[in-house]
């Protein structure tokens, strides 16, 4: 079993839709959880960062971590064509060291 | 500079040749990471530097791959005797801690 599993999609939604992106992870010791957004031919950029369980909201984006089920979610409200990108979930064993990524979900928001 | 800079942005090389990829991290970032991203795959960790030392090089796929970091700043990833399966985007990231983890735009390597 891979440490972080993510459905690669692709996912296509109409503009204005609510998007739900999800990952599962295997190691209960993971404490730090991130969502990265990657546009074509660019490096990933940090979108959301969460420590331990709970929700974090930033504008149209909400990150949710459920440590009991080892489930990570990203919700995008009122999705825009500019949200079209690949979204990668990631986790980290401690506060230092490498990140462990899911394969990424390719999202397309149609006008 | 303001961000992580990688060069070259694109590299086409013949099978069997050696290549060097360069990463210039954000000034002051003590940690530096190399990842590889192949088509349809996630980011695969290669090596991690803290300052000039590499406490974790567990992701290097073979002894053809090596990396160094000098002056706690610039890092070079070297691939010797390149193979076609080495074709990928090589990404560098630097950080002070988890929230400051910043990626460069990558070097797209094609081995023909």
Image (spheres, rainbow, N blue to C red):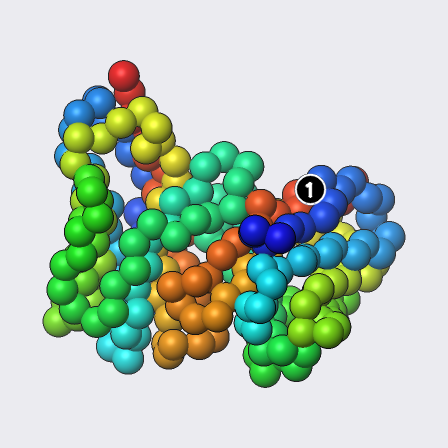
Quadrant holding the N terminus of chain A: bottom left
- Relative image position of residue B64 (x, y in whole percent): 76, 66
Measured along the vertical axis of the image, is residue A8 above or below residue A85? below
Q: In percent of the image, x 45 and y 37: which residue is there?
A: A39
Q: In percent of the image, x 16 and y 36: which residue is there?
A: A77
Measured along the vertical axis of the image, is residue A102 above or below residue B109? below
Residue that numbered label 1 is attached to: B9
Q: Is residue B64 left or right of residue A40?
A: right
- Relative image position of residue B88 (x, y in whole percent): 63, 47
Q: Is residue A64 left or right of residue A94?
A: left
Q: In the displayed orientation, state which residue is furthest to the top.
A: A111
- Relative image position of residue A42 (x, y in whole percent): 53, 40
Q: Secondary structure at mark 1?
A: loop
Q: Is residue A51 left or right of residue B8?
A: left
Q: Is residue B87 visible?
A: no
Q: Is residue B47 left or right of residue A72?
A: right
Q: Which chain letter goes with mark 1?
A: B
Q: In percent of the image, x 21 and y 48: which residue is there?
A: A58
Q: Is residue A106 visible?
A: yes
- Relative image position of residue B87 (x, y in whole percent): 67, 47
Residue B84 or residue A111, whichever sits in front: A111
Quadrant holding the C terminus of chain A: top left
Measured along the vertical axis of the image, is residue A75 above or below residue B63? above
Residue A85 or residue B94, whichever sits in front: B94
Q: In percent of the image, x 61 and y 48: which residue is there?
A: B106
């Amino acid at each position: 079993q891979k440490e972080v599993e993510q459905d690669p999609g692709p996912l296509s939604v109409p503009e204005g839709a609510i998007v739900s992106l999800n990952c599962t992870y295997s190691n209960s010791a993971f404490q730090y959880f991130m969502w990265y957004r990657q546009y074509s031919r660019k490096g990933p950029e940090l979108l959301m960062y969460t420590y331990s369980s709970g929700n974090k909201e930033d504008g149209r984006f909400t990150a949710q971590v459920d440590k009991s089920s080892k489930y990570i979610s990203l919700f995008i409200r009122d999705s825009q064509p500019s949200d079209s990108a690949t979204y990668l979930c990631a986790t980290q064993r401690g506060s230092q060291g490498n990140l462990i990524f899911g394969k990424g979900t390719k999202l397309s928001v149609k006008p | 500079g303001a961000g992580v800079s990688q060069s070259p942005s694109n590299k086409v090389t013949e099978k069997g040749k050696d290549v060097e990829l360069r990463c210039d991290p954000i000034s002051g970032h003590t940690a530096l990471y190399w990842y590889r991203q192949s088509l349809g795959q996630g980011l695969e960790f290669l090596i991690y530097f803290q300052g000039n030392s590499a406490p974790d090089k567990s992701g290097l796929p073979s002894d053809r791959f090596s990396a160094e970091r000098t002056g706690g700043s610039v890092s070079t990833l070297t691939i010797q005797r390149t193979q076609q399966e080495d074709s990928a985007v090589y990404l560098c990231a630097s950080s002070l801690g988890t929230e400051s983890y910043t990626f460069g735009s990558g070097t797209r390597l094609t081995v023909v």
